[in-house]
Image: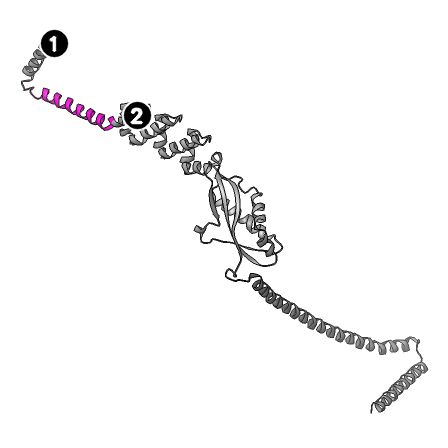
Amino acid sequence: MENLYLLTTLAGRVKLDRGGSMDWVWPAILIGVGLVGLIVIYFAFKYLSLWLQAMTSQAPVKIMSLIGMQFRKIDPRTIVIAHIQGTQAGIDTTINNIETHYLAGGRVRSVINAMIAADRANIKLDWNTACAIDLAGRDILEAVQTSVNPKVIDCPNPAHGTDRLDAVAKDGIRLLCKARVTVRANIQNLIGGATEETVVARVGQAIVSGIGSSASYNDVLENPDGIAKKALASGLAAGTAYEILSIDIADISVAGVDREANVGAKVQAEQAEADKRRYQAEAERRRALAVAEEQEYKAQIHKNRALVVLAEAEVPKAMAEAFRSGNLGIMDYYKMNNIKADTAMRGKIAGDNQGNKAK
């Protein structure tokens, strides 16, 4: 009572000193207290259900933490539900860790669900690794599900505009092939590991290479699993986020004869036509070579004749030189001319006799 009396006396003195009215002070104080109370009651009722849900789920959360989330632009319900799920499943995480991942742009519910699924499947996955995979843009929940339940990938991917691999065997026959790859996610390689597109590209390359190294398309059609086994043994999963379990040839056919009943006959007919054109081309090439060779021989003959003419032109020069040097006398020259005339006469007589016999 003494304190109340002092306050009243002090208020009276202030009123007298200022010469004004102080009637508004107490209503303002009461209004302020009322507003604060209303705000507290509002937040209390707003988060009371979440607080009670966390308390009854053995995952207690402070009411002030829930109010602080509102000011930090965090959805309290997402954080609390994730905390309850993790606690009930025995996941080693805290409210602060969940809030940090939420503020970093992570998918909190997906990470929690992935860790629960990994724990049930005895897959080692800690909170930091799961958050890193999620922040890297990978779907961590899908990765865990793929680890438990392997999925099948089409090779090639139909979304890229083609559903068949195109390859040519050594005998020149073009084959169309479709494969299916069964993969299982490797959690430890999700960070930095190559994606499905790399696996599809490597498998396609291995299959095309296997068909290209086959001596005949018949070998591929008879034993398509040989190509698949060869591709599987090539270590195609190195550096990827997946483990390749199997490669299966779903469909393989000869290009252009999908609807033919007798594929062998059509292929043989086309091969015969191709061989015909090839042999005709080779024959034409040999004929052209023969004509060119004949022309070369004719040119060589003309060249040799020119050389003979040149050599004969040297004979008079040599005889003149022999006269000047005294190595050839006039009588020797006459004897040589007589021999040439006699030889020409004999040749003419022999030619006339052969003409008479022919007649």
Q: Is residue 218 above or below residue 273?
A: above
Callout 1: 10 Å neighbours few (<14), some, many (20+)?
few
Left or right: 249, with 338 as reference point: left
**Residue that mark 1 sits on:** 3
The quarter holding residue 339 reads bottom right
Callout 2: 10 Å neighbours few (<14), some, many (20+)?
some
Q: Is residue 177 magenta?
A: no
* Camera sees residue 99: no
Residue in front for this viewpoint, 347 or 171: 171
Element assignment for label 2: helix
Q: Is residue 298 above or below residue 193?
A: below
Q: Looking at the rendering, in which quadrant would you find the N terminus?
A: top left
Disc on res. 327: none
Q: Amino acid at mark 1?
A: Asn
What range of the chain is rendered magenta? 22-48
**Residue that mark 2 sits on:** 54
The quarter holding residue 321 reads bottom right
* Camera sees residue 269: yes
Question: Reading the chain from its start, which is encountered first: label 1 or label 2?
Answer: 1
Picture colour scheme: one colour
Q: Amino acid at mark 2?
A: Ala
Residue in front for this viewpoint, 76 or 317: 76
Kindly identify the residue that appears in the image at 91 percent across and 86 percent down.
342
Element assignment for label 1: helix
Instruction: List x then y, in percent, for residue 359.
Output: 82, 92
- Dominant SS type (magenta): helix
Q: Is residue 23 magenta?
A: yes
Left or right: 22, with 220 as reference point: left
The quarter holding residue 338 reads bottom right
Q: Is residue 234 above or below residue 131?
A: below
Instruction: List x then y, in percent, for residue 95.
Output: 34, 26
